[in-house]
Amino acid sequence: MNDGRREPRPVIVPLGGFLGAGKTTLLLSAARVLRAQGMRVAAVLNDQGDDLVDTRLVEEHGVPAGQVAGGCFCCRFSDLIDALERLRAYRPDVIFAEAVGSCTDISATTLQPLKRDYADRYRLAPFSVLADPARANDLRGADADPDLAFLFRNQVAEADLVCFTKSDLEVKAPYMPGAPVRSLSAATGQGVAEWLGEILAGELEVGRNLLEIDYARYAQAEAALSWLNCRAVLRLQEPLSPAALVGPLLDKFDAAATDAGLRVVHAKLMDECATGYIKASTCGNGEEPRVEGALDASPAVMHELRWNIRAVAGPDELRRIVEKLVASLAGEIEIRSLQCFRPAAPKPERRMSTVASRAFPKTAG
């Protein structure tokens, strides 16, 4: 029976930005702030492949999560809608939607269709594009990789709000013309509550920028990267803690990739066992990993590894390195899944050439 009340419309908070910009870390930091205010939060993660470290990490933090795999939101728009609809069962007030780190043209292919066709189901926050200051300096430099610079430049160009992350590292961010710029640190919480207050206030225009993008050039840029997603179950001969397993394994991968001339763009390794989990990530060869989780977890025999790697490399060489490293572990290894590929050319389901009217008022309605 319909009592006349309108069904609540969750606010979708779209997050974009290059690989390693800190999207998932910000999502989790923001979720803590919102839940402390009594709000319910959910998330949709997005990737070219499956078995995502980020999805598992978000679930570990108690945030209901959906996943759009096999392509960007633009190419899997129907899957995005299906994921959002499934998450409505949790009655979330806010749903974060984190796009693939190599994806761009999100405004025309995702934000505008949401504004035009789903205003009765969802409200939409401004599109925040995150940027790591150190990587932004590199990608705007004269000697930047042209494919990676192309992706970064277009991501920033369509932002409603550019957020420089990792402000706790005190790296000077480059000047960015165009969208308003903010600085924050998900690691310390600096600026996160203020950012949420701004994007949820309903004052900023949503999806105001459309790109004129050459899709052949876009496909070439994405295909410069190889993507590897691996999930394996290990029964070790001798118990190891997650930290004792992940640290040396990531170090060995870095050394092998560097020796082979592979340029690591983003590598994430997550280990789960009965005593806790560890997640470590790097954004380049020789970089000190950023680690979170149960650093003091006790040794265990059974471990489940998820490994997501994005690198400027051939997929066969990247796969060979990872298979060799996993096989070198002392114990019984079962590889549950292993994908290594270059992304297919993007083919959006819906692409709008004009900005849809503002259909998301401040009130929940």
Image (tube, helix red, strand yellow):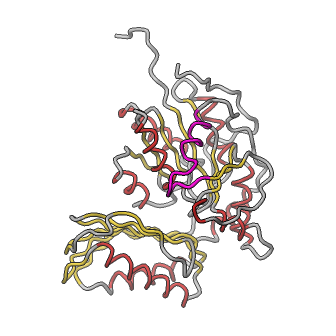
Q: Which residue is at a point 75% across and 43% down the rendered structure image?
A: 210
- Residue 280 at x, y percent in the picture: 43, 69
- Whether residue 307 appears in magenta in the rendering, the answer is no
Residue 344, quarter of picture:
bottom right
- Residue 72 at x, y percent in the picture: 56, 53
Q: Which residue is at a point 56% across and 21% down the rendered structure image?
A: 363
- Residue 206 at x, y percent in the picture: 67, 35
Task: Using residue 177 as the reference point, say whether residue 364 is left or right of it.
Answer: left
Instruction: Please state which of residues 330 and 297 is positioned toward the viewer in this rendering.
Output: 297
- Whether residue 196 appears in magenta in the rendering, the answer is yes
- Residue 239 at x, y percent in the picture: 20, 78
Residue that extends furthest to the bottom in the rendered view of this protein: 259
Is 8 drawn above or below residue 124 in the view shown?
above
Residue 285, quarter of picture:
bottom right
Q: Which contiguous range is marked in magenta?
A: 184-200
Q: Which residue is at a point 36% across and 32% down the rendered structure image?
A: 89
Say how many tags the image has. 0
Task: Using residue 343 as the reference point, say whether residue 304 is left or right of it.
Answer: left
Instruction: Please state which of residues 359 and 39 is positioned toward the viewer in this rendering.
Output: 39
Task: Using residue 96 as the reference point, say whether residue 159 is left or right of it.
Answer: right
Instruction: Please state which of residues 170 and 100 is positioned toward the viewer in this rendering.
Output: 170
